[in-house]
Image: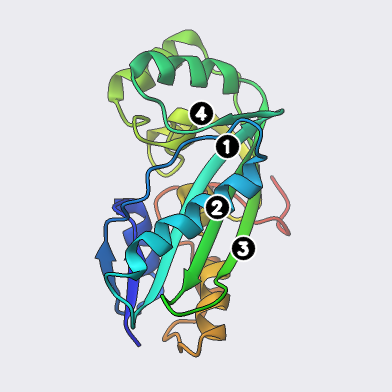
Amino acid sequence: MRLILASTSPRRHELLRLLQIPFEVAEPTFVEQLARETGPEQQARFFAEQKARSCAQRFPEALILASDTLISVGREILGKPADPAASAAMLKQLRGRAHTIHTAVALGRHADPAWDVAVETVQVWMRDFSEAEAEAYLRSGEGMGKAGAYSIQGLGGDLVSRIEGDYPAVVGLPLRLVARLLQRRGMSLPVDVEDLYRKKPFPNWERFNLPHESKT
C-alpha cells in the first residue's frame, strides 16, 4: 500500500519514520489562511484535509496523510510567526500561562467520498521565563516556522513546564492517532505503538509525561 505524507516538515517525517512503514513525501499546494470566525479545532481539521486533498490528484491510487497544528490561547488562534517580531510577540503572549494545541490528521484517497479526519488536543503550560531567556531563544531562530513560535523537541522544551496529552501531537504528528487510522485502512504496522510510547524515542519526549502518568 503506497503511502504519501503531504508535508515538508522534517519533524513530521521523523515522527512517521518511528512507525517503520515505507512512505513518500509530497509538498501540499494548499495555502493556509486563518479564518478568525472559525474555531481552532475545526480550522486545523480543514487545513489538514485540504493539504491532503491538494496532493491526492497527483497520486490518485495512494493513501495520502496530512497533518496541521494550531495553537489557541483563550479565543485567539496562533499560527506560524511571519517574522522575528511576531515570534517575540507570541512568546510574550504564551509566557507563564497555558495554551491548547490542536493537531489534526487527515487520511484518504482521491476517490474516497469522505476522508478520515481527527484531532488530538493537548494542554501545554509555559514557564514564566525571563526576558533574557526569551531573547536567547529568539536569537536561536528555532521558533520560526513553528506554530506558537517554539519547538518543544528542541531548545523550546526548556520554556515548557508541563503538558497534558500526546507529546508527538505537540511536535506535529500524533502517532497513536495516525497508527489507528492507518490500521483501519488495512495497513499493518511492524512496531508496537504502545511500546514506542513507553520508550519515547524522540528528542525531549522523556521530559514530558503522558496523561496517565503522575508528574514528579
- Proximity of marks 4 and 1: CB atoms separated by less than 8 Å: no
- Report helix, strand or loop for mark 4: helix
User: Disc 1 designates what residue?
Assistant: 71
Comes first in the chain, label 3 or label 4? 3
* Helix, strand or loop status at disc 1: strand
Q: Classify mark 2: helix, strand or loop.
A: helix
Q: Earlier in the sequence, mark 1 or mark 2?
A: 2
Question: From the viewer's perspective, is residue 207 above or below residue 148?
Answer: below
Residue 36 in the image, given as x and y percentages of width and height: 61, 30
Identify the residue under disc 2.
46
Query: Can the viewer see residue 135?
Result: yes
User: Which residue type carries mark 4?
Assistant: Leu
Q: Nearer the viewer, mark 4 or mark 1?
A: 1
Q: Where does the image place residue 150, in percent across and percent down from the top left?
A: 44, 32
- How far, Cα to Cα, is label 1 from label 3? 16 Å
* Mark 3: few/some/many CA within 10 Å (<14, 14-19, 20+): many
Position of 212 compared to 201: left or right? right
The residues bearing labels 3 and 4 have C-alpha atoms spaced at a distance of 28 Å
